[in-house]
Image (spheres, rainbow, N blue to C red):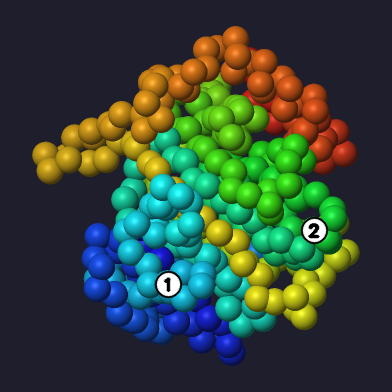
Amino acid sequence: MAYCVALSDADRSCCAEFDPAQLSLHIAPALDHCLAAPTHATPTMAPARARLLACLSALTTLAAASWVAAGGHRMTDQVINGSSDGDQIVGLSLDRVMGSGFRSKTSYLFARIDIDIKLVAGNSAGTVTTMISEGQWNIHDEIDLEFLGNLTGEPYTLHTNIFANGSGGSEVQYRLWFDPTQDFHTYTILWNSEEILILVDDMAIRRFKNHWDAGVPFPVYQPMRLNGVLWDADQWATQGGRVKTDWTQAPFTAYFRNYRATGCEPSLDGAWVCGQDPSGGGDWFDGGVAGMDDVKQTQQLREAQQRYTIYDYCTDSVRFPDGFPKECGLP
C-alpha cells in the first residue's frame, strides 16, 4: 500500500508514501510533487478530495515514508494488513488543516477488493470517509463508496457512484443496518468485465452491469488503484450541506484494516494475469461470490433496494424529467 498525508495551509501540501514491504521507514516531504500534480476534479468531486487524490498520484514513485498508526505505533506490513486479533490498524485523521489517505501500489484491470473500515464516531457531520477505486487518467473511471458523516445519534449514509469513460451521475445511497462506528465492517468492490458488485459484510447491495453494447459507459480498459481518503465536505455531505463540520470535535479519525485484493495485473510479457479469489471460493472474474449463487445474490439486492435504499438516480424524475438514463431500463 502507498500511504499519503496531505496538509493544506495556504495551498501548501506535504505528502508521503508507505511501502509495507519495507520495515525501515522515514519521512519524505514532497511539496513540489503535490503542487505540480493535476487534480482532474470532476464537477461532483470536492477540491479537498481532488487535492488528496492528486497528492497520492504524484507520490507513487517515492521509495518509502513513515507514518504512525493510532496510538503511536510504527506502521509495518502487519499493521497495514491487520493482525489476527484485529488490534493493529491504520488511522486516517482530519482536522482544519489536514486530510489524509492511502492508496494501493498495484493497479488492477478488474479486481475484487475487500477492506475493513470503522468510521468516525460521534459528531461526524461534514466528514466523508471514502473507499474509491480510481484510475489516474484524463478520461475518468471510478468506483466510489463514500460514507457521509452525521450528527451524533443520526445514521451514516453510504453514497455510491460509478464513473466510466468520463461519465458519472449514477448515485445510489443507502442507510446501513448497523452502527459503522462501533466495530469494523467489511466493504467489497467486485469489478469484472460483466458487472460491478458492491457488498457490505458479504451482502450484495448494488449491481451495475456492463451494457457497453447498448451505449452505456462501463470501465473496461483502464486499470485502477484503491484509494482511502478522509476529507471535509461540509458544503454538501450532511443534510445537503445544512449541517457543517464542528471543528471543536477534531481530530476526526477513521480506521482501516485487512486490505485484501486480487485482480488482473500486467506480467513481464505484457499479458494480464488474474489472481484467485482471496475469500476462498467463487470465481470473481466470472461474477461469482463465495457462498452466493445467483438466486441468493438477487434476493440480497432486492432486500437492499427495498429496505436500505434512500436514493436511486434511476427513480429521480425531478432530476431526469425527460426520461431516465438508458441503463435504468436495461435488465
Q: Is residue 146 visible?
A: no
Residue 327 image-quadrant placement: top right
Q: Residue at x 79, y 65 (%)?
A: 123
Q: Residue at x 67, y 61 (%)?
A: 120
In the displayed structure, does residue 276 sit left or right of residue 157?
left
**56 w.r.t. 42: above or below:** below
In the displayed structure, does residue 173 sit left or right of residue 264?
right
Give whichever of 90, 48 is nearer the camera: 90
Give the number of marks: 2
Q: Which residue is mark 1?
A: 73
Number of other residues with Cα within 10 Å of mark 2, as a class: few under 14, some 14 to 19, many 20 or more: many
Q: Position of residue 175 (x, y in %)?
A: 77, 41
Give whichever of 239, 21 is nearer the camera: 21
Q: Position of residue 79 (x, y in %)?
A: 39, 60
Give whichever of 76, 36 is nearer the camera: 76
Q: Where does the C terminus fall, quadrant-wise?
A: top right
**Amino acid type at mark 1:** His
**305 w.r.t. 253: above or below:** above
Q: Does the CB distance between marks 2 and 1 fall below 8 Å? A: no
**238 w.r.t. 6: above or below:** above
Q: Which residue is mark 2?
A: 150
